[in-house]
Image (cartoon, rainbow, N blue to C red):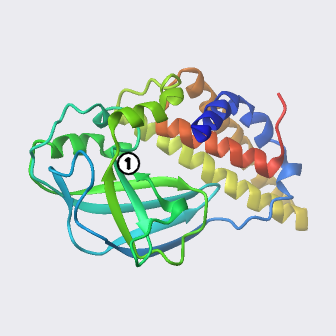
Amino acid sequence: MKRILVIFTALIAVHYLTSCSSNPSNRAANEQEETFNASVMLKPTTVKIDGSLSAVLEVVEGEYRLNYTQKLLRYATIAVKIRSNGKGNPNDETFKDYTNGPLSLDVCDKQGQSIAKFSSIGNSYKDDAKLKEMMTKSGEYWVSFDMIVEDNLPKDAATFKIATVNASDLKEAYADVYVLCNTVSAANVAKWDKLLDDFEDSYIQLEALNKKLARKQDAETKLAFSKLDKKVDDLCDSINRACDEKAFAPMQAVRIGRLYSEITKREGTPHQ
């Protein structure tokens, strides 16, 4: 629960984003590597999916690509083909709560041992409708799993396994975030995802321009920095308004909290 409480606090404090994002002098100190991509192929340790959905779902044998992307945050994503017999319960709350789960994937080594910082990767909340359909329609479906991770792609990653998380456990884990979110449509989810992607990408570009200015103060770079700095400020304003309106989905709220934490770590604690 500590992680969720930190996110909850950071989400309230996200209104500080505007002030911290428009302080270019702080950005010059950041030397962290910019956007980085890597991937590794994984095989399931077993086709069985443990837990309450074991009688309905199983993994389709094959190799699957785990993608790792480092921007402001580190992201791990993998799409897995899952077979359903169509004999499940479509009314499970986890199929309509806009949080990751109820499926949970652990990245493992060759011996099938879970790798701690790449464990409990939930299926994407964007696949809620698909999972609900899988409860009543048999067939093979691609299901996406994604997570904000705390470490680099592990060199010993070779396999994976999937289990089911109970609805009550998911509800408890995200209880503090639910109260801040009123998202009720997939269209809104896509809209805010685009906004957060744009903010994260623009912030990285702004850091790169700031480093360039630290080396050489040329007029062209100054102009580009000024335009992009205003864009980042405008995006921060949009994020703040959406927070006021409780417009984000729970997993987007989690992402905002992580972005806020990363930015304050890079720039120092912002002030109101």
User: In the depicted view, which residue is nearer to us: 3 or 50?
Assistant: 50
Residue 120 image offset from top left, x and y in percent: 44, 53
191 over 12 or under it: above or below: below
Q: Residue at x 29, y 41 (%)?
A: 128
Q: Residue at x 53, y 78 (%)?
A: 155
Looking at the rendered structure, the number of numbered marks drawn on it comes to 1
Q: Does residue 98 show up?
A: no
Q: Which residue in the structure is indicated by mark 1?
A: 124
Instruction: Mark 1: give few (<14), some (14-19) or many (20+) Cα within 10 Å.
Output: many
User: In the depicted view, which residue is nearer to us: 238 or 65?
Assistant: 65
Residue 59 image offset from top left, x and y in percent: 23, 63
Mark 1: amino acid: Ser
Residue 79 image offset from top left, x and y in percent: 33, 61
Direction from residue 248 to residue 215 in the image, left or right: right
214 over 92 or under it: above or below: below
Q: Does residue 85 show up?
A: yes
**Which quarter of the figure is the C terminus placed in?**
top right
Direction from residue 236 to residue 100 in the image, left or right: left
Q: Residue at x 62, y 39 (%)?
A: 2
User: In the depicted view, which residue is nearer to us: 231 or 219?
Assistant: 231
**Which quarter of the figure is the N terminus placed in?**
top right
Quick one: SS at disc 1? loop
Residue 188 image offset from top left, x and y in percent: 41, 33
